[in-house]
Image (spheres, rainbow, N blue to C red):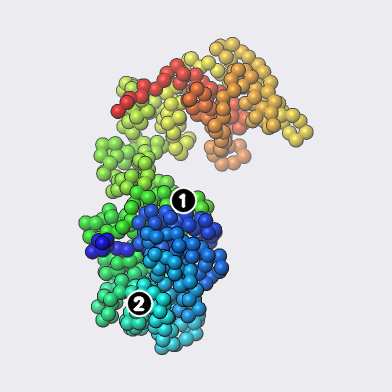
Amino acid sequence: MEETKGKVFIFDTTLRDGEQSPGASMNPDEKLLVARQLEKMGVDIIEAGFPVASDGDFASVQRIAREIRGCQIAALARANAADIKRAWEAISGAAMPRIHTFLSSSDIHLKYQLRKTRAEVLKEAVAAVKCACGYTGNVEFSPMDATRTDRDYLCEVVEAVIAAGATTINIADTVGYAIPEEFGELIATLFARVPNIRQAVVSVHCHNDLGLATANTLAAVQNGARQVECTINGIGERAGNCAMEEVVMAIKTRKDLFGFHTGIKSEYIHQASRLLTQITGIAVQPNKAIVGANAFAHESGIHQDGMIKEKTTYEIMTPQSVGISDTQIVMGKHSGRHAIANRLQEMGYELGEEEINSIFVRFKELADIKKEVFDEDIEAILYEESSRQEEKYRFLYLNVVSGNAAVPTATMQMEVDGQMVQEAGFGVGPVDATFAAIRKITRTDYPLLKYAVAAMTGGTDAQGEATVQLKFNGRSAVGWGAHPDILVASAKAYINALNRLEWLGKNPRQVKVI
């Protein structure tokens, strides 16, 4: 039997509330993929959808209910018999079906949306729960907009629906209005004033309009809630929902404070995040907690120094614990000498103090131009420092003719082993023609893995930078060039990459086997 003492149950509504996020619609096959990932992670309850919304949503919920056997499958229904019947038809084939019905409880919703009295709404809520209990004993009821509901009335509603058979009561901060201390106190009030509250599991569903969804959820857990409703990446209506990865890792990382656990296999969190991003096209902000690209990246020199010495100095959880392979030490203008020396060693280069100092100076110069410096850039500095007088190829001259009424033609002059060589190249555009001329002169035809250009400053007179990545004989090299004329910058970058490949061929990395 599953250990439930001290457990916080995870109710994932990515496929229902999450899909309501603008642009996040998923087709049935994609929904099933997400459901399988949630099952793999160990989610307790999957809210598969809102069956009455459309025939397509009904079919998706029904398919998930039939194919996912390791989780409870919930279907959402408004508090009326037709919705509830439709929900049951969709999930009746589930191994563990749940009907989740809801009805607004705040005066503002009653007055302007439902146009009903408190007594009428209470009666409808009780009737809906009783109707759902006619299909299954696993019934959840949500008083919508609970955080803006009169406390006395909320307690009355909760007591009545539990008496009618609801086994889960979900307190919804529907519009993200609550503040953590206030929300925690609301949950505590329910436990203090509702006589039968312990006959049901208290759940919370928090929206992120004020950026407090996770904080409110955790405050609720501290005050007795044992189910949290959340979504992958925090997607959902407006500003989204409580992010599943945040609440799970907060409970896991601060077990000393909470004393609880979830059934989530956290090593699948990053995988789930990436899957959802690929399906919906909704990118995760780089500084997003847990799953953002920068969540385990360090650029500050002080932080990098600490991470090199002991990772716990600046990381409260390991990247592996959420399914990320390793910490990323970002080489940038804030990186210190120690970080550069360590990266060089990791790359397999054994250098003396004087060489490291020289490379560090060049690194800082480049980092002031580029936001992030990659291993290939560091190798380019190594190459320039060690073979400044030994370049096989040197740029001398470039002239390009191009336009919609002319065949793009590039005339190049280069030095090859100290000898001037001139050739012309043709292409589909000026850059293609320039690279063709270089290939003719150097008698090379290496695969071009990457070509990118960018302005280094603002304005039409900005200096442009070009990046070229070439591959040969299992090695790749990145070349970089800068010039006010982007074609010249591109030529310099290509030549720089060629020289890098030459240097790498003569100076293979001395990689250590550990």
Is residue 14 rendered to the left or right of residue 227?
A: right
> Residue 271 or 40: which is nearer the viewer?
40
According to the picture, the residue beneath numbered tag 2 turns out to be: 166
Amino acid bearing label 2? Ala
In which quadrant of the rendered image does the N terminus lie? Answer: bottom left
Q: Position of residue 65 (x, y in %)?
A: 45, 64
> Residue 450 or 67: which is nearer the viewer?
67
According to the picture, the residue beneath numbered tag 1 turns out to be: 275
The residue mark sitting in front, 1 or 2, is 2
> Residue 329 or 138: which is nearer the viewer?
138
Considering the numbered disc 1 on the image, is that residue within a helix, a strand or a loop? helix
Q: Position of residue 371 (x, y in %)?
A: 46, 39
Q: Residue at x 64, y 24 (%)?
A: 436
Please, is residue 434 above or below residue 41 in the view?
A: above
Q: Report if residue 246 is visible in the image.
A: no
Please, is residue 360 above or below residue 22 in the view?
A: above
Gap in Å between the C-alphas at discs 1 and 2? 34 Å
Task: Residue 137: name its quadrant.
Answer: bottom left
